Image (spheres, rainbow, N blue to C red):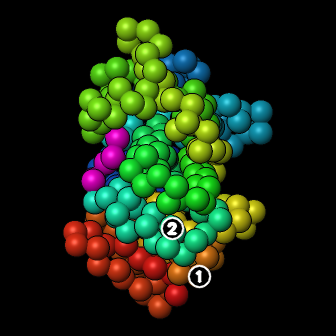
Amino acid sequence: MVASDPSEYKVFREYLAEACGIVLGENKQYLVSSRLRNLMIEFQVDTLRTLVELMSQVSQRHLKQAVLDAMTTNETLWFRDAHPFNVFRDKLLPEFQQDKKTSVKVWSAACSSGQEPYSLSMLVEEYKKNHPGALNCSVDILATDLSMSMIDACKAAEYEALSLGRGLSAERQQRFFDVVDEKTWRVTSDVRQRVRFQSLNLMNSFASMGKFEVVFCRNVLIYFSAELKTDILRRIHAVLRPGGYLVLGASEGLADLKHHFKMVQCNPGIIYQAV
């Protein structure tokens, strides 16, 4: 119903690409239909063209945010794809310890429902417990996402009990979560206090964010055009400290920016170091 007309779908695809960089394939009408059906009923909108026209009005910012939230929100897993987290724990944290850094800043870009930044914070807690007094630097994690509803949910740090089984061991669940009720658990304060959340469109400037030792930008660049992907990677390089690390998704690469980064083999896994 929502995306049955190819011309209507084309108008929406072009709007979404301009608004947040996501490039939908020509065969994704079903995705648009399933994600926007309830919103279009709620706002009494019959066509995608009308929806785009409404979102373009200043007075309809709420509608625009709701549509972008619907199209970009994806729940992820705890410790998704174990290799990057193992590299963070076994290579990067010991390296920061050896370098005697006083502070380390980590950016989790496109953090979705918060599992990645909270998983990283759990690893810091485990490292400190297993190496008493060794990691004297503060580790601060900035987590960003386009979706305001996701950011609000991340700040609440409450998760359904069933979702904790998606990548989280029973031991970590008991150690790093408090029971809210029979269906809900909340991330403990020692893990939460290390993570700060804010809304960010990756198409916008990163200049005000400061410098980072590590940037996790996983499983999001695949949704962008080649030109935007290159632009984002170039701007990530600009906010990495010299020698800082970039962690991408398993199916993502550097495009034509190999002169900005060098590949670091981690056996298993690959990360990239700013040069």
Q: Residue at x 44, y 9 (%)?
A: 181
Q: Is residue 227 visible?
A: no
Q: Which residue is mark 1?
A: 242
Residue sitting farthest toward the left: 268
Nearest the eye: 217 or 212: 212
Disc on the earlier residue, 2 or 1: 2
Number of the front mark, 2 or 1: 2
Where is residue 190 drawn, in percent x and y?
55, 36
Nearest the eye: 54 or 227: 227
Give the crowd class for mark 1: few <14, some 14-19, many >=20 residues within 10 Å.
some
The region drawn magenta spans 78-82
Q: Is residue 260 left or right of residue 115?
A: right
Nearest the eye: 218 or 132: 132
Quadrant housing residue 119:
top left
Q: Is residue 179 visible?
A: yes
Q: Are discs 2 and 1 less than 8 Å apart at CB?
A: no
Give the crowd class for mark 2: few <14, some 14-19, many >=20 residues within 10 Å.
some
Q: Which residue is mark 2?
A: 97
Query: Label 2 is placed on what type of residue?
Result: Gln
Chief secondary structure of the magenta portion: loop
The answer to if 55 sits in the magenta stretch is no
Would you place residue 86 above or below residue 8 in this image? below
Report the Cα–Cα distance between label 2 and label 1.
17 Å
Q: Residue at x 57, y 31 (%)?
A: 189
Q: Is residue 117 left or right of residue 86?
A: right
